[in-house]
Image (cartoon, rainbow, N blue to C red):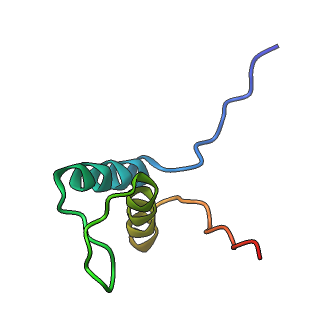
Amino acid sequence: MAKKAKKRKYSKGAAKKVGRAMKKRKTGTLKSGRSGRKVKSKKQAIAIGLSEARKKGAKVPKKRKKKS
């Protein structure tokens, strides 16, 4: 029995955007939206990369809703 091929959750383009955001964070040039403060958190850098990928129309799952 052959294994079923897995579909990618994120496109290659989305992975490139996240990689670029992580690289910018490491060099200290990645800045957040309105405030323009330097991003230090890995999670925030990933979120920025995914957000940019969404804007470009890359295959990225929808944002999760906050649990209250």
x, y (%) of residue 44? 43, 62
**Nearest the camera: 14 or 26?**
26
Q: Is residue 20 above or below residue 62?
A: above
Residue 21 vertical position relative to residue 48 in the rendered view, above or below? above
Nearer to us in this view, 65 or 62 = 65
What residue lies at 39% left-to-right and 65% top-to-bottom? Answer: 48
Horizontal and vertical percent position of residue 49? 38, 60
> Which of the 4 image quarters holds residue 6?
top right
Asked where in the image residue 50 lies, by quadrant, the reply is bottom left
Task: Single out the residue that lies furthest toward the bottom.
Answer: 34
Q: Quadrant of the C terminus?
A: bottom right
Q: Quadrant of the N terminus?
A: top right
Q: Position of residue 62 (x, y in %)?
A: 62, 67
Residue for point 30% across, 84% down = 35
Task: Residue at 41%, 64% (x, y): give it.
Answer: 53
Viewer-side residue, 33 vs 53:
33
Query: Height in image: 4 above or below 61?
Result: above
Residue at the right extreme? 1
Viewer-nearest residue: 25 or 57: 25
Going by the image, does 54 lie left or right of 31? right
Q: How many marks?
A: 0
In the picture, residue 4 is in which quadrant?
top right
Compared across the picture, whether 36 is left or right of 11 comes to left
Q: Name which residue lies at 23% across and 49% down.
A: 26
